[in-house]
Amino acid sequence: QCGQQYCWAFNGRTNITLPEKISDAPSYAPAFPILKKMVEAGISEITDMQAALSGRDDRPLFENSLVFFFKLTQQMIEKEVLSIRAPQGYLFREDCLSALEVRGNEVYGSGQTVADGD
């Protein structure tokens, strides 16, 4: 659907719990093969307040802060490099570490706590 062997599919939804409620036309972008499958990964569902406090803005062409999670197949004992790639056309800041937040009481905005399982 994107003209390549691997494609990312993006679908806008008005309500994540109702997958049939599509809010926009789907779009596709060239992807890349996945080296090792993760146990679990996704973008966290957040409240409107958490979206405002964490900088989430889903409008086209606006900078957007996403809260995503992943679980690896094994515990990392040694220091490793984590590479995160987005589909073609999506941009990360060149120095994205300055915008990376891992503190549980800051991920969803200052003072917001991470729910169990996130």
Image (cartoon, helix red, strand yellow):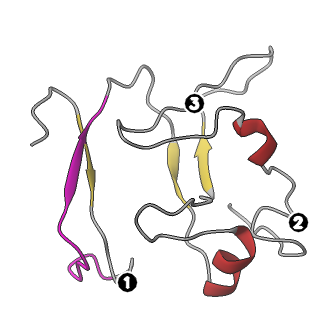
Q: Circle 3 — which element?
A: loop
Secondary structure mostly seen in magenta is loop
Instruction: Please rate how many residues cluster around mark 1, counting C-alpha atoms within 10 Å: few if below 14, some from 14 to 19, many from 20.
Output: few
User: Residue at (63%, 40%) from the top-left corner?
Assistant: 93
- The amino acid beneath tag 2 is Asn
Q: Is residue 12 left or right of residue 117?
A: left
Q: Is residue 32 above or below residue 103?
A: above
Residue 22 coordinates in the image, percent (x, y): 23, 78
Upstream in sequence: badge 3 or badge 1: 1
Question: How far is the residue under mark 3 from the one under mark 1?
Answer: 30 Å
Q: Amino acid at mark 3?
A: Thr
Residue placed most toward the observer, 112 or 65? 65
Which residue is at 80% across, 71% downward? Answer: 109
Q: Position of residue 90 (x, y in %)?
A: 43, 44
CA distance separating discs 2 and 3: 26 Å
| Quarter of the image where one finds residue 26 | bottom left
The answer to which of marks 2 and 1 sits earlier in the sequence is: 1
- As helix, strand or loop, the secondary structure at mark 1 comes to loop
- The residue at the far front in this view is 61
Q: Quadrant of the C terminus?
A: bottom right
Q: Is residue 21 magenta?
A: yes
State the extent of the magenta-drawn residues as a range: 18-31
Residue ID for mark 3: 73
Residue at label 2?
105
Q: Amino acid at mark 1?
A: Asn
Residue positioned 14% across, 39% down in the render:
2
First of labels 2, 3 by sequence position: 3
